[in-house]
Image (tube, helix red, strand yellow):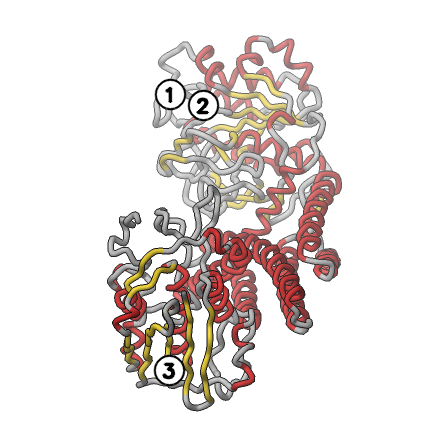
């Protein structure tokens, strides 16, 4: 017999209460952890360990009626969090991003051309060290001299509008070329300078360099309206602030120049994002080196000139040159103070090109009214509810297919009609109704099974059907629970930290963990059928130490209730050859029931006797309410519980005594009960 390094004493459980998490507080569980993935692997294990086999947890099993009450509490918590925190917005943003990624591809833009300022162009164009400026990381900017050359070429083209997107540091007041670009812009109304450094969503005291004050009407911000640099850009403001004066943002100014019918609004507009390859592009080096080749391709187009490489934008803004969109995901930012971006995201130049395209084509995303949302929710909920009448597998597949189709349809609405129908409320309703319908179906199935004629063949069929249903339902419900908990956690990270909200989230997390453990137990109950007499191994067990180890798990609660545990073992019955895991589970459950259903200030006796040359009887005697004689056989049936609330206010799981009998018979023994109402009970296990 091998020795378990975690338990050198040889018994299944540690010899001291401090070394076991359940030793002092888990006496109400149906069983301790019967099979654990980190347990012993010696030949005396209950069964051989197979690769990929999951552990069984037979503790904290909750009955269907308790699950219904629990689900009601979870529903209330989720609904409260959903409508009082950022949970709903977080979920809606997730669907917004999904529709953006699923949106069908579009042809190359016929309205906007992008002139990129990239590292290769800057290196080739900036030969004068006196004009060269660098950012905080010594990366060079394009000089105003070369920017003026590019602007002059564009001013001589037939472009409908020209947007120069420059960081704040691109316009130092001391630059000798400032007056030249000012004069160029001043006499060319098609040109708009966009800068992040002086234009804010909220008013500030920033001011433009004095040389640019004369053309302040042609300077606009391209504020992306984000609370932090690494947030996702989903919407842009129609107006921002230049100093203390409200002005139109750059996309709106360009739309006003290009489209006389454009009517600027207030607030924000939702972007329909396109990938960067949607827009024709040329480098600024190509423009300056070959203007005659590039200029004809700009006729009638809006030209956006901007950096497509990382640069610091200045010290007065939270706007980096790189941004996130639903198509690019989160940035791996390194330093919020310097806005150094090493991976992820796209240049804000592409965000502005998207925004201008949206406004010119009137393709900004509009939100649907309440009516389509209600109709959509009712339709999805009805389909999912009906599918549960056809079985758990059918319902799971139906729900998945319906939601995939819904996202596909929404993506087409998004692409062709620029319409966004909210999905967060529909998702919440679908989840709650599906969970409720699944729970109701499970309860009905269990009730029907219990009413069948209890022949041996019928019992086997019912058990197999019941186990299969429980396994499928619990696995699906566990997946749904983990999805909802994940969204709750994401919402918790972006919600205000007031004490009441923290308490609500803590209750939700605690309840979710308990519910997941319950579902995992239900899901693995069918694995018990794999236990067979041929695979069970036995070893010599010293019963005195073995039983006292079980007593120690009740130390804390027994002191609180003044319950005393006694052991009476005869000399000829101190050892038994059996499987320690199964024997532990039987005795623990007997003792747990005696403790749970017994009064305070009482004694619980475990008596061990050799009743024949080949059999040992282990009895657990209590002074509880007792069990009526006509129920002595039924209490060992699966899922049977005594429903007399006057006598048994504490509800069990309906599995404990059934498993005691199952384990005893697997060991070649039997279970018996002697009980009388108001006098107490004696539960016996007779083993060879």
Quadrant location of residue 209? top left
Closer to us: 436 or 309: 436
- Crowding around mark 1 (Cα neighbors within 10 Å: few <14, some 14 to 19, many 20+) is some
Q: Which of marks 1 and 2 is in front?
A: 1
Quadrant location of residue 19? bottom left
| Inter-mark Cα distance, 1 to 2 | 14 Å
Q: Earlier in the sequence, mark 1 or mark 3?
A: 1
Residue denoted by label 3: 622
Residue denoted by label 1: 133
| Inter-mark Cα distance, 1 to 3 | 88 Å
Q: Are marks 1 and 3 in contact (CB under 8 Å)?
A: no
- What residue is rendered at 71% in x and 53% in y? 394
Horizontal relation, residue 330 to residue 292: left or right:
left
Asked whether residue 87 is in view, the answer is no
- What residue is rendered at 50% in x and 55% in y? 532
Please, is residue 134 above or below residue 217 in the view?
above
Q: Nearer the viewer, mark 1 or mark 3?
A: 3
Q: Do the residues labelled 1 and 2 touch (CB within 8 Å)?
A: no
Please, is residue 132 above or below residue 50 in the view?
above
- Crowding around mark 2 (Cα neighbors within 10 Å: few <14, some 14 to 19, many 20+) is many
Percent position of residue 297, x then y: 68, 16
Asked whether residue 649 is in view, the answer is yes
Disc 1 secondary structure class: loop
Residue 178, numbered label: 2
Horizontal relation, residue 551 to residue 343: left or right:
left
Q: Which of marks 1 and 2 is nearer the N terminus?
A: 1
């Amino acid at each position: 017999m091998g020795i378990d390094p975690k338990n050198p004493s040889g018994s299944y459980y540690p010899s001291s209460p401090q070394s076991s998490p359940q030793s002092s507080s888990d006496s109400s569980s149906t069983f301790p952890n019967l099979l654990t993935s980190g347990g012993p692997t010696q030949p005396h294990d209950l069964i051989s360990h197979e690769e990929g086999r999951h552990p069984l947890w037979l503790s904290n099993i909750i009955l269907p009626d308790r699950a219904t009450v629990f689900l009601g509490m979870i529903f209330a918590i989720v609904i409260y969090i959903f409508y009082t925190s950022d949970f709903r917005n977080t979920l809606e943003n997730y669907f917004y991003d999904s529709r953006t990624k699923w949106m069908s591809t579009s042809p190359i833009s016929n309205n906007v051309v992008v002139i990129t300022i990239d590292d290769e162009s800057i290196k080739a164009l900036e030969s004068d060290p006196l004009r060269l400026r660098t950012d905080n990381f010594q990366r060079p900017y394009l000089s105003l001299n070369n920017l003026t050359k590019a602007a002059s070429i564009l001013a001589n083209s037939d472009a409908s509008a020209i947007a120069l997107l420059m960081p704040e540091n691109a316009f130092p007041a001391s630059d000798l070329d400032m007056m030249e670009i000012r004069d160029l812009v001043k006499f060319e109304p098609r040109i708009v300078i966009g800068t992040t450094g002086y234009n804010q969503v909220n008013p500030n005291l920033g001011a433009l360099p004095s040389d640019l004050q004369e053309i302040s009407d042609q300077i606009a911000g391209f504020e992306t309206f984000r609370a932090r640099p690494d947030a996702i850009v989903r919407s842009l403001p129609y107006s921002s602030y230049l100093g203390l004066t409200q002005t139109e943002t750059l996309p709106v100014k360009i739309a006003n120049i290009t489209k006389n019918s454009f009517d600027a609004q207030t607030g924000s507009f939702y972007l329909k994002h396109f990938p960067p390859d949607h827009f024709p592009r040329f480098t600024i080096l190509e423009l300056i080196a070959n203007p005659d080749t590039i200029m004809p391709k700009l006729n009638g187009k809006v030209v956006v000139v901007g950096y497509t490489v990382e640069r610091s934008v200045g010290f007065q803004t939270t706007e980096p040159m790189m941004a996130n969109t639903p198509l690019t995901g989160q940035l791996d930012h390194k330093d919020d103070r310097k806005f150094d971006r090493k991976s992820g995201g796209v240049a804000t130049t592409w965000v502005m090109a998207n925004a201008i395209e949206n406004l010119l084509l009137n393709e900004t995303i509009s939100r649907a009214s309440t009516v389509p949302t209600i109709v959509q929710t009712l339709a999805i909920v009805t389909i999912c509810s009906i599918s549960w009448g056809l079985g758990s597998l059918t319902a799971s597949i139906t729900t998945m297919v319906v939601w995939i189709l819904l996202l596909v349809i929404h993506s087409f609405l998004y692409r062709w009609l620029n319409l966004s129908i909210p999905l967060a409320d529909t998702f919440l309703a679908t989840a709650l109704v599906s969970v409720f319908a699944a729970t109701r179906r499970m309860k009905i199935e269990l009730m029907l099974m219990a009413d069948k004629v209890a022949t041996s063949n019928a019992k086997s069929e019912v058990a197999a059907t019941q186990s299969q249903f429980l396994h499928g339902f619990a696995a699906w419900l566990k997946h749904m629970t983990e999805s909802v908990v994940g969204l709750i956690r994401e919402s918790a990270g972006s919600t205000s930290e007031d004490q009441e909200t923290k308490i609500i989230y803590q209750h939700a997390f605690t309840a979710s963990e308990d519910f997941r453990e319950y579902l995992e137990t239900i899901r693995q109950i069918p694995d018990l059928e794999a236990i067979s007499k041929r695979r069970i191994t036995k070893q010599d067990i010293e019963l005195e130490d073995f039983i006292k180890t079980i007593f120690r798990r009740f130390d804390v609660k027994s002191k609180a209730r003044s319950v005393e545990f006694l052991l009476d073992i005869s000399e000829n019955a101190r050892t038994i050859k059996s499987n320690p895991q199964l024997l532990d589970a039987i005795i623990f459950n007997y003792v747990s029931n005696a403790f749970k259903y017994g009064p305070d200030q009482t004694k619980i006796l475990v008596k061990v006797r050799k009743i024949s040359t080949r059999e040992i009887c282990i009895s657990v005697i209590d002074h509880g309410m007792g069990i009526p004689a006509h129920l002595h056989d039924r209490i060992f049936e699966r899922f049977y519980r005594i429903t007399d609330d006057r006598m048994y206010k504490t509800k069990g799981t309906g599995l404990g005594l059934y498993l005691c009998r199952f384990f005893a018979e697997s060991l070649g023994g039997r279970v018996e009960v002697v009980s009388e109402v108001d006098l107490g009970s004696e539960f016996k296990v007779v083993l060879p």
